[in-house]
Image (spheres, rainbow, N blue to C red):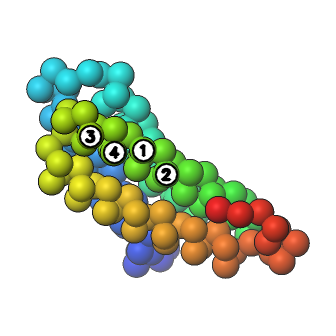
């Protein structure tokens, strides 16, 4: 098993940070609906990357990475909302946003290079 998969490692580490953010928000009695949204999307990135690595075909791999990309975009949205409503410290939110951006770039690149030429008309 290959253990130096950058996107797999980064998405897992990101999920750990998102879980810690959720626990902190829960402890601070922040709105749980928002905390749960960012928890779901932020941890789903890595879960989909893990599924992609175990994919049965190139198309399956690309599809799971595409879902992970969309989850990274959704997480980016929730973090911006949490930051801009002062529910999360701006420095923490900005750090998590930077990581979400990095994951989005990595995943977009993976999806674009993995797709077959006949799939190229779909955009990210």
**Neighbourhood count class around disc 1 (C-alpha, 10 Å): few under 14, some 14–19, many 20 upward:** some
Q: Which residue is mark 1?
A: 77
Looking at the image, the residue that sits furthest to the right is: 118
Q: Which residue is mark 4?
A: 80
- Circle 2 — which element? helix
Q: Earlier in the sequence, mark 3 or mark 2?
A: 2
Mark 3 vs mark 1, foreground winner is 3
Above or below: residue 82 compared with residue 65:
above
Q: Can you give x and y, in whole percent of width and height, for residue 31 in the image?
A: 26, 21
Query: Marks 4/2: CA distance?
Result: 11 Å
Q: Which residue is mark 3?
A: 84
Above or below: residue 58 compared with residue 82:
below
**Neighbourhood count class around disc 3 (C-alpha, 10 Å): few under 14, some 14–19, many 20 upward:** few
Tell me whether circle 2 and circle 1 mark residues in contact (CB < 8 Å).
yes
Q: Which residue is mark 2?
A: 73
Tell me whether circle 3 and circle 4 mark residues in contact (CB < 8 Å).
yes
Q: Earlier in the sequence, mark 3 or mark 1?
A: 1
Left or right position of 37 against 86: right
Q: Can you give x and y, in whole percent of width and height, for residue 12 in the image?
A: 36, 57
Tell me whether circle 1 and circle 4 mark residues in contact (CB < 8 Å).
yes
């Amino acid at each position: 098993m290959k253990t130096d998969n950058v996107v797999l490692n980064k998405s897992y580490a990101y999920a750990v940070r998102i879980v810690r953010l959720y626990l902190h928000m829960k402890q601070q009695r922040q709105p749980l609906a928002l905390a749960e949204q960012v928890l779901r999307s932020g941890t789903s990135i890595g879960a989909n990357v893990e599924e992609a690595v175990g994919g049965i075909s190139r198309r399956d791999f690309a599809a799971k990475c595409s879902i992970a990309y969309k989850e990274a975009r959704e997480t980016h949205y929730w973090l911006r909302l949490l930051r801009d409503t002062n529910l999360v410290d701006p420095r923490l939110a900005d750090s998590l946003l930077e990581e979400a951006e990095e994951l989005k770039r990595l995943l977009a690149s993976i999806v674009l290079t993995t797709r077959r030429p006949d799939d190229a008309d779909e955009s990210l």
